[in-house]
Image (tube, grey):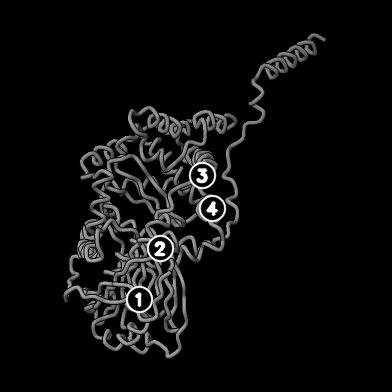
């Protein structure tokens, strides 16, 4: 009897102790990443969009090469985070460092992620930097850009980005597609809340304290003056700290990783990197500085360079039948065996064999834009100067001439440069015929006809016929 009483007493004490434990101990469970869902854009389309847009980033921003110790550290940290994602739901993530002082980061569909130098130098520890990266990875994982884009707009956007072309035509096209949200960085508050939640899971699985992501946002919010660009591009979904605390509340406690010596070294190296502010970067992009810098440093990947190999005239020869297209208040006839791609304020008409994902070697680019110019002559001079600033090898080969387009006064000039077409490893000379007129709403409409020098005269009658067909609303 004494022994049974002792067992009963022990059992009772155990039950009392169990009842005294917090209720959440019975419901603790390791977090798992949610299913990302199925947007209207395929994986292949998202990767194509991301790579095309990344190519544009290298023309618009200074980016450290992969050989940089700072980039290598960020890529090593990124690889650690990527390993926490199940392979069936992962993406070919890439991690790059932008030489910008301001605190920011952005992700592109399909995997490219860019982190500003200012973000690295502002992070208090490796967990905070990992949090920013995990947050951006989550936008890719949850496919936020693809989900926010109506199906009917997908091909239009891909076509517009396909108009980000090499050479003089590329500069004109970039002017036209600038309004389409080239870097696709804006997210809704719901997207931001979801990226915080998914990013916290990635951090936890990788061994980082998820609350460090919230602390990083808190530090940014406490900064005086105008809010950092990061907060402008990543709208606050509410109380981030409270939301992340709620997410992690029922997760099992674990020993989180301490700060690392590698982070301290990378942060010191980042402090020594030549970084530019946002205005300097915008001004440099207008002058074509960053494409040259990234090309010379080896930062620009080969895929971002425009090249077409051994294109014959027969492959691009215009057919005898013409069809018509109307966009942006402009109507133009073109060979029916050529293709079109339209953006918000640009239109490309090209033979399929004369264009790649990042370059056009044959065809017409039409762009509509507002210009603060006192006259048509001044607008033409400004456009030519912008083209030459963005393409140092571009030369004006004749005087500005008077022309008529759709019954309106216009100005025309010929330019020479380097074609994306290669033969025997050498890029061919290129001729560009630029025509500029004023649209009905006071905008300026430019037409730039492109071909390698060797083929331009054979295409001149077709180009003239296309120009003669133009009607302006």
Q: Is residue 217 visible?
A: yes
Q: Nearer the viewer, residue 295 or 323?
A: 323
The reply to whether dot 2 and dot 4 touch (C-beta < 8 Å) is no
In this picture, is 376 found above or below 69? below
The residue tagged 1 is: 407
Q: Position of residue 331 (x, y in %)?
A: 43, 74
- Describe the element under mark 4 as helix, strand or loop: helix
Q: Earlier in the sequence, mark 4 or mark 1?
A: 4
The residue tagged 2 is: 345
| Residue at 36 percent of width and 33 percent of height | 259
The reply to whether dot 2 and dot 3 touch (C-beta < 8 Å) is no
* Cα separation between marks 3 and 4: 9 Å
Q: Nearer the viewer, residue 16 or 115?
A: 115
The residue tagged 3 is: 188
* Cα separation between marks 2 and 4: 21 Å
Q: How many marks?
A: 4
Q: Earlier in the sequence, mark 1 or mark 3?
A: 3
* Cα separation between marks 1 and 2: 22 Å
The residue tagged 4 is: 148
In this picture, is 376 found above or below 132? below
The reply to whether dot 3 and dot 4 touch (C-beta < 8 Å) is yes
């Amino acid at each position: 009897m004494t022994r049974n009483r002792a067992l009963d007493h022990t059992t009772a004490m155990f039950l009392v102790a169990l009842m005294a434990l917090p209720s959440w101990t019975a419901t603790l469970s390791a977090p798992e990443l949610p299913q990302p869902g199925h947007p209207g854009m395929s994986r292949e389309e998202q990767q194509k969009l991301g790579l095309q847009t990344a190519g544009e980033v290298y023309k618009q921003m200074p980016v450290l090469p992969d050989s940089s110790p700072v980039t290598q550290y960020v890529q090593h940290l990124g690889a650690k985070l990527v390993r926490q994602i199940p392979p069936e739901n992962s993406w070919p993530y890439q991690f790059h460092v932008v030489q910008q002082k301001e605190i920011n980061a952005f992700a592109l569909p399909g995997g490219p992620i860019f982190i500003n130098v200012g973000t690295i130098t502002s992070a208090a520890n490796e967990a905070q930097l990992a949090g920013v990266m995990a947050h951006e990875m989550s936008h890719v994982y949850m496919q936020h850009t693809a989900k926010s884009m109506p199906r009917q707009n997908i091909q239009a956007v891909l076509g517009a980005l396909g108009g980000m072309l090499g050479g003089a035509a590329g500069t004109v096209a970039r002017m036209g597609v600038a309004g389409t949200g080239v870097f696709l960085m804006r997210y809704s508050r719901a997207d931001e809340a979801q990226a915080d939640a998914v990013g916290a899971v990635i951090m936890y699985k990788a061994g980082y304290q998820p609350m460090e992501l919230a602390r990083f946002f808190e530090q940014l919010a406490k900064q005086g003056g105008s809010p950092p660009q990061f907060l402008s591009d990543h709208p606050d979904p509410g109380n981030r700290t409270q939301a992340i605390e709620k997410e992690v509340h029922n997760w099992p406690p674990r020993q989180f990783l301490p700060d690392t010596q590698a982070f301290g070294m990378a942060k010191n190296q980042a402090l020594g990197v030549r970084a530019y502010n946002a205005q300097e970067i915008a001004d440099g992009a207008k002058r074509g500085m960053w494409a040259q810098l990234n090309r010379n440093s080896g930062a620009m990947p080969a895929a971002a360079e425009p090249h077409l190999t051994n294109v014959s005239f027969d492959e691009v020869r215009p057919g005898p039948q013409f069809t018509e297209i109307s966009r942006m208040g402009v109507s133009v006839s073109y060979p029916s065996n050529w293709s079109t791609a339209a953006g918000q304020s640009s239109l490309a008409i090209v033979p399929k064999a004369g264009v790649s994902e990042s370059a056009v070697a044959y065809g017409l680019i039409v762009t509509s834009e507002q210009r603060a110019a006192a006259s048509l002559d001044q607008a033409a001079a400004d456009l030519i100067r912008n083209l030459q600033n963005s393409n140092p090898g571009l030369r004006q080969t004749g005087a500005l001439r008077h022309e008529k387009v759709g019954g309106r006064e216009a100005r025309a000039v010929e330019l020479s440069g380097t074609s994306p077409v290669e033969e025997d490893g050498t890029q061919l000379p290129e001729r560009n015929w630029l025509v500029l007129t004023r649209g009905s709403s006071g905008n300026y409409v430019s037409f730039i006809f492109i071909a390698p020098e060797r083929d331009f005269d054979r295409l001149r009658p077709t180009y003239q016929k296309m120009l003669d067909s133009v009607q302006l609303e």
